[in-house]
Image (cartoon, rainbow, N blue to C red):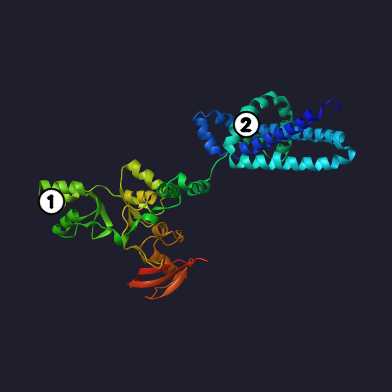
Amino acid sequence: MNEVPSSILLAAIILMLLTSAFFSGAETALMTLNRYRLQHLAKENHAGAIRAHKLLQRPDRLIGFILMGNTLANIMASSLTTVAALRWFGESSIALAAGVLTLLVLIFSEVAPKTLAALHPEKLAFPASCLILPLLKLFYPLVWVVNAIANLLLRMLGYRPEMGGITTLSKEELRTVVAEAGALIPERYQNMLLGILDLETATVEDIMVPRNEIVGIDLDDPLETILAAITGSRHTRLPVYQKHIDKVIGVLHLRKALINMSAAEMDKAQLKKLVEPMAFVPENTPLHRLLINFRRDQRRIGLVVDEYGDVRGLVTLEDLLEEIIGEFTVDPLDIQKQPDGSYLVDAGVTVRELNRIAGFSLPTEGPKTLNGLIIEYLETIPAQGVSLKLFGLRIEITLMEGNAVKQVRLSPPPLD
């Protein structure tokens, strides 16, 4: 070693520091790659992504090889630095040389390359894989021995290293990914994706039209009233019943009724012939199951029933689609934003719709309407003018209608 020129000795130290930096940066870059983007790029036949994906299939081998290279480079740098210090400054300089080398390794071979790799993993990981993959094959016997010993220790602790490459996302993690996508996914599409993810947690009861708001045809009404309801309806299908909705006969497609009305005289007997069977849906049916059932049975409407068979409401395919893509038409009088930042709200709106439009976080597990939520909280029928604080919102009851809250003013908490 004494015959080696000082310039070559210094160049060797610098080379070892660069080698250590390469392995440190490559390790961080490969380990911080987005696995789902990597899989997508690999399917698109991106050469760098294919190599990186292959390396990450067995992270134990990859880490073993990188640490071997990094450790070897650091040890070589330390040995060469000791030789250089003895040659240039004598034995008294060894401790100082070790301190300087530690600082250089920390800055130039660890912190700087790893920070750069964490900020731009693909730019470093894909080129680095060109060198790491063939070197890993070349030194595989040595890597295998080291990993065999390390994996044996891990198995004794109950871990399976070969399963380390399998990654999955839970539904809540996927929600976070979609919500945090920012400009990568337009807001309207984010809301649609989140709506699809919510189909499993929401039930028919969350989106149904309440029983008292069902619009239908009562066969006990005069024929003129029935025909006027058919020609003036804004719906395409209406339930047909006698006296009350619990005695439902079926559902009438208004297009068929209008065709028959224009072709001949319409009477109640002819009307009954056009009525199709009504589907009945349990109130606790998840929305994803309802969508499957509607598609399988080719239906667009159903009556929601409780455990006793009594009609609770009505649900349509349109209601189901609105849960995914948002309201087709929203009555501007239902939720009115005021100049002072408060909201004047029809208390009959559903809590889910209010949360979606106003951005609130009211609970949806209990009562489905704002009126029901207020009455459940107060445990009594309130009087007009009563104010309360509910889930961080200041609520003032501005209008009562019988025993129900008709309208309220909602004021969000002030910003700190």
Q: Horizontal and vertical percent for residue 279?
A: 31, 49
CA distance for labels 1 and 2: 80 Å
Residue occupying the point 19% across, 54% down:
230
Farthest left residue in view: 264
Residue 237 image offset from top left, x and y in percent: 25, 50
Label 2 sits on what residue type? Answer: Ala
Q: Is residue 68 visible?
A: no
**Residue 266 in view in this figure:** yes
Query: Could you say whether the residue bearing mark 2 is in a helix, strand or loop?
Result: helix
Vertical relation: 192 (above or below) 393: above
Of residues 351 and 252, the one drawn nearer to the viewer in this rendering: 351
Task: Report the residue marked by disc 2.
Answer: 128
Q: Residues within 10 Å of mark 1 (few under 14, many from 20)?
A: some
Q: Is residue 309 left or right of residue 80?
A: left
> On residue 266, which mark appears?
1
> Residue type at mark 1?
Met
Quarter of the rendering occupied by the N terminus:
top right
* Residue closer to the observer: 236 or 100: 100
Q: Position of residue 83 (x, y in %)?
A: 84, 33
Residue found 89% across the figure and 37% down from its top: 90
Question: Which quadrant holds residue 142?
Answer: top right
